[in-house]
Image (tube, rainbow, N blue to C red):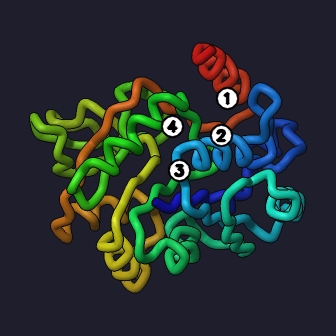
Amino acid sequence: MKFAIIAAGEGSRLAQEGVELPKPLVRLAGEPMIERLIRIFRECGAESISIIVNTLRPETEAFVRQLMADGRAGVPIHLVVKSTPSSMHSFSELAPSLQGSPFCLTTVDTIFREQEFARFIEDFRQSDADGMMAVTDYIDDEKPLYVGTDDELRITGFYDTPQPDSRYISGGIYCLRDSALEVLRHCIEQGQSRMRNFQRALVAEGLRLKARPLSKILDVDHAGDIRKAEEFLGGEK
């Protein structure tokens, strides 16, 4: 199984709030966020990790290349250095390296408990679904994407506002198979530019998606989120 990290965002809100490091290099409990994900993915049996970083903060590229050079990554890294207009376009840049294998994709600032994530990955490996999305009923997001599900946690839709069948919101962690890459290509051709529209397209094109609840998933968008994330992860120990 392959893994992928979108780390090409500008992190402008963190910078405006006085955080000098590029977002991927912000440390949680002493560990840069991008290195934390690489370690977790390796421990989950990643055969490779594809990463996209932007051209605006060369420190991130240099950090990843050093991990690759000194062997600390412990798994093959496919690095793309490119600034893109959206996360969906970043995903599209990674798509060629994800073909031919199930994969898990997330953004660099998605924070979750490691043991829960490992169980999520194992559940996907055992599933015959076209995709499995990590969801949570913990809502601490400026613009949450609500996930509609049936009684068996099959995903029926993605919504910008709460619906009767949307107990959960998207956690931004996507386990998918090759069929999803064709949907991604269609979205890019149609001029779509948001990951939530890609998720809607997965449903519209008939892919079988399952929701997998995690207790809590956080994003690091603001300086105050760093402390929140550290406190949350401190509960693992």
The span from disc 2 to disc 3 (Cα, nearest Å) is 29 Å
Residue visible at 65% across and 22% down? 228
Which element is circle 4 on?
A: loop
Three-letter amino acid code at disc 2? Asp
Which element is circle 3 on?
A: loop
Q: Where's residue 221, x and y in %?
A: 65, 40
The span from disc 4 to disc 2 (Cα, nearest Å) is 10 Å
Q: Which of the two discs, 4 and 2, labels the residue nearer the N terminus?
A: 4
Q: Is residue 139 left or right of residue 14?
A: left
The span from disc 1 to disc 3 (Cα, nearest Å) is 29 Å
Residue 45 marker: 3
Quarter of the image where one finds residue 207 = bottom left
Residue visible at 80% across and 51% down? 72
Neighbours of disc 4 within 10 Å: few (<14), some (14-19), many (20+): few
Report the mark closest to the observer, 4 or 1.
1
Q: Which residue is mark 4?
A: 142
Quarter of the image where one finds residue 74 = bottom right
Residue 184 marker: none
Asked if the residues shown at circle 2 and circle 1 are in contact, with their CB atoms under 8 angstroms apart, the answer is: yes
Report the mark closest to the observer, 4 or 2.
2
Q: Is residue 83 left or right of residue 65?
A: left
Asked if the residues shown at circle 4 and circle 2 are in contact, with their CB atoms under 8 angstroms apart, the answer is: yes
* Front-most of residues 122 and 199: 122
